[in-house]
Image (cartoon, coloured by chain):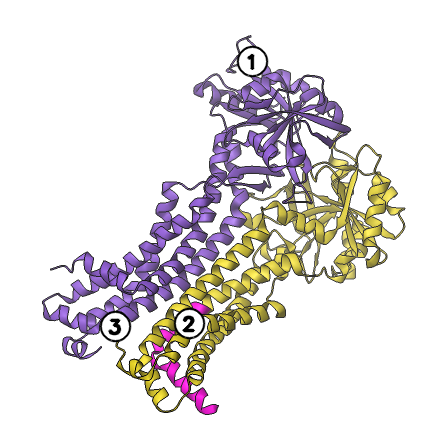
Chain colours: A yellow, B purple
Amino acid sequence: MSRHLSLIFKNSLRNKRRSVLTILSIAVSLCLLGVLMALYHSFFHSEAPEEQALRLIVRNRVSLANPLPLSYKQRIAGVNGVKDVMVFQWFGGTYKDARDPANFFARFAVDPEKLSTNFPEYKMSEDQWKAFLSEQTACIVGRKTAARHNMRPGMRVVLAGDIFPVKLQLTVRGIYDADRDNENMFFHFKYLNESLSQGQMDHVGTFSVRLERVEDAGMVAKAIDDMFRNAPLQTKTETEKAFELSFIAFLGNVKAFLLLICGAVTFTILLVAGNTMAMSVRERVREVGILKTLGYTPGAVMGLLMGESVAMSILGGGIGLGLAYGLCAVLRESPSMFTDMSRITVPPPVALIAMGVAAAIGILSCVVPAYNASRRPIVEALRFTD
Amino acid sequence: MKIPLTYNLRNLTVRKTTTVMTALGIALTVAVLLSVAALVQGLRTSLQASAHPLHVLVTRKGSTAELNSITTPEQFQTVKAKPGIAKNAQGEPRVSQELITVVVLESPENPAGINITVRGLTAVGMAMREDARLVEGRMFRTGQREIVVGRGIAERYPMARMGRKIEFGRGYWEVVGVVDAGRSAASSEMFVDLNQLAADQGRQSALSSILVRAADQVSMQALMNELSSDRGLNLDAQAEKAYYEAQTSSAAPIQIVGTFVAVIMAIGSSFAAMNTMYAAVARRAAEIGTLRVLGFSRLGILTSFFIESLLLSLLGGLLGCLLVLPLNNMQTAIGSFVTFSEISFQFEITPQIMMVGLLFSLIMGATGGLFPAGSAARKQILVALRQG
């Protein structure tokens, strides 16, 4: 066996340039495949983290653009299984120059005293929480956004509203840390509400509901929607994860888009690898004749050729996966619209699938030329000229 | 002396499988780039078609979209009285105050539902959308809970077909007509009577935006200045064209991802092209030697192999263009983060897009072909003749 391995190794070194090019092109494509699958996984397959699974989002059934009355908060809080309800108002608006996408980060008006209970994953020092609560114009920002815009406690931040015709003068009072989405800004809903005209006052886009137990999610969501079934403004309650997914659906058919591209990428690698293997096998037909003269069975010859192909594509796949990990790290650091993007990584199942694809490509790309070469009669093989 | 092009063409046809496989790899790469480009182009065309060159969109100062604009009936009266506004046959100014809201429609494709714009307007406003032709049924009547839907909506959402009833606000709205507005945004909107919608939403005194038709290009600029600078009004006026152009950014995420994928795939495909060309050079070593003996220069050999690589990639580029052709005019939709609702449009493949695809494939061919061609040109005559 080890004899064969060294033969396989020597064979793949014979045309170094070709092997390197093949491995590189497989690596590049598999890196892409890895990142795309990681993206797909983080959007559609990842389980909500425990804290997130405990949260529901309540919004107007008609659409996000239609608000709900603030008074719904009390009624939702009374539903069985609800631990707490917090106003969770998307502010939008612009910070500095809106035309620069780097200035985009999510801004929410919330009930500050409930933020730490509804979002226990946000970590901040006791003092900063206190400072945030005690001042109506205080705001806190996530570590990532704070770093990007050089925000420090005590700094003044002006937000110009677009949905709301107001200009908010806020002071940064804290920088929070979180495993995911440490990019948001939170400030007092009361401050926003009191700046609004009669028409817009006391209306809320979304409420964030914290559950007692994860298992109750479906039941509580139904209970809330049922409660407002006959009210003039009906609600739609869903898990926070589902709510985030509805934004991705908004971008178009992302699922099909990703799958289609993954398919195209895989097929392209198959073509590339198949082409190279066909070339390298064709060059070696005479050699195959010699091997068979020496007593190698067609099966052994085929194994040798396939082994080389699989070894190369697995090596390419390994390099590709390494690149994919690196690329995901870059993606995690760049500003993104979706919280799922901020913790994207190549999870083990995706890595496994990618390596499986690499191995399959090694086998598929070689099976036809290897079979033909190994079945060629010795005399014909020895006479073969390319 | 130049090596004739037929030499390269024949070489490509000798190794059919290799040629086709390499070209197909390039073709798929080009296809990914082109499908994204066709999507963005379709969106751009649709948005451009949506804007009338003489239309001015008036919104509350600071709001970025019709949806979050608020204007009052009093402001409407003031706007109507401004100079430079076109008049209709009855002598009324062509100004339309509208109420925009969004509703969620479910479709088999998206069972969770997607936001669709509902626009409340008057007969004057409907008449200002001259490209919207009624293709089925009739217009909504004033004072009735009736709704007219854009053709794109009727086609994609079974629940919004003729005769069906859509539920939103305080009850049901009967679909009484379908309008076709070509590629413009009106094809993906629904229209109802302004007063009915305002009453339904309790927004009689807080309507959305005001659309104004200027008399001509010259008065349009003056009108926009006049509206924006009127402190009492506190409104913003912009050309409808500029408003729609800004929404092209909705396709940015898909455009970024798609382009990124295409570029990475292109790197892989160039490696493949390089492999194929190196193999071609190796296989034809004796041939190269012969060509040199016959008096062809090193530069001639270099050019010839380089051109062969370009031809190979061009074939891939053409195949890629063919692959995306079925996408042309295919209906699709994307959410706009400006209007918070869906814009439906068609993929559009233009000659320019195809040119970009071919250029892209040629770049792959050039990067893949340069080094092998160089190595072919560097071959020593005697060594080359002995090889192969």
For the residue marked with disc 3, what is the amino acid? Answer: Arg
Q: CA distance from mark 2 to mark 3?
A: 21 Å
**What predominant SS class does the magenta segment belong to?**
helix
Q: CA distance from mark 3 to mark 1?
A: 78 Å
The C terminus of chain B is located in which quarter? bottom left
Image spot of residue B280 (x, y percent): 27, 68
- The secondary structure type at the circle numbered 2 is helix
Read off the chain for label 3: B
Mark 1 Cα shell of 10 Å, populated few (<14), some (14-19), many (≥20): many
Task: Identify whether B25 is placed above or below B193.
Answer: below
What's the amino acid at mark 1?
Pro
Instruction: Give the number of the mark in front: 1 or 2.
Output: 2
Picture coordinates of residue B174 (x, y %)? Answer: 70, 26
Q: Do tags 3 and 1 sit on the same chain?
A: yes
Say which residue appears at 25% left-offset and 66% top-offset: B373
Q: Which callout, 3 or 1, points at the residue further toward the start of the chain? A: 1
Q: Residue at x 57, y 11 (%)?
A: B92
Query: Which residues lie in the magenta part?
Result: A1-26
For mark 2, what is the residue?
A368
Which residue is more in the foreground, B167 or A288? A288
Residues packed near mark 2 inside 10 Å, few (<14), some (14 to 19) or many (20 plus): some
What residue lies at 9% left-to-right and 67% top-to-bottom? B295
Residue depth check, mark 2 versus mark 3: number of the one nearer the observer:
2
Residue wearing tag 3:
B283
Residue A297 left/right relative to B315: right
Give B15 or A125, whichever is nearer the viewer.
Answer: B15
